[in-house]
Amino acid sequence: MRGACHLSRVQFQRIDLLGLRARAALGLAALDGGVDRRWLARARADARRLERVAIDPALGIASLVFGTALYIEGKRPEALARFEDASARFDARGMRLHSAVALLARDVAAVGAARAGEGAAARRLLALGVARPLFMLRVWAPGMRK
């Protein structure tokens, strides 16, 4: 039984590190307002690795990464669908903060940061104790600017 617990911890560390590397690549892809396709490709490669893990937290992070990459490229409708999927995956595992971040990303993509910062997803993050929801979004979805 101890081995299975250790394996689970290793798997979740792998998910966290792949997600972190993918988010760093997204941040670099959108640096200075541009679109660096090499970094987007790196972020997507890590998101595909997360998809292969095939559990909801990994699939949710993968959808958040893919959605952010689509947003950076200006493909808003496709990004919205990915953010919705991410939120549903996180909700399935009781990951309320992650789910609310994905919904805030959806709202920013749909109506812009100013209006999204006043919306239901931002209020949900505030209720969870996040003092600055749009700042939290930049941590989890670098490149979500406008």
Image (cartoon, grey):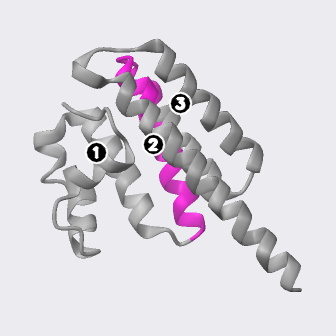
Question: Relative to 104, is 33 above or below?
Answer: above
Q: Quadrant of the C terminus?
A: top left
Instruction: Judge depth for marks 1 and 2 and give the one in front.
Output: 1
Query: What segment is highlighted magenta in the picture?
Result: 68-93
Where in the figure is residue 61, as x and y percent of width and height?
54, 48
Q: Which residue is mark 1?
A: 138
> Alpha-carbon neighbours of circle 3 within 10 Å: few (<14), some, or many (≥20)?
many
Residue 92's place in the image compared with 42, above or below, is below
Q: Secondary structure at mark 2?
A: helix
Q: Are marks 1 and 2 in contact (CB under 8 Å)?
A: no
Query: Residue at image x 59%, y 65%?
Result: 92
Residue drawn where x is 63% and y is 61% of the image? 13
| Nearer-N-terminus badge (1/3) | 3
Question: Tag 1's secondary structure?
Answer: helix
In the rendered image, residue 113, in percent from the top left (x then y), is placed at 17, 40
Considering only order in the chain, which callout, 2 or 3, is on the residue closer to the N terminus? 3
Name the side, left or right, on which 138 lies relative to 70.
Answer: left
Q: Is residue 12 magenta?
A: no
| Residue 107: quarter of image | top left
Q: Which residue is mark 2?
A: 83
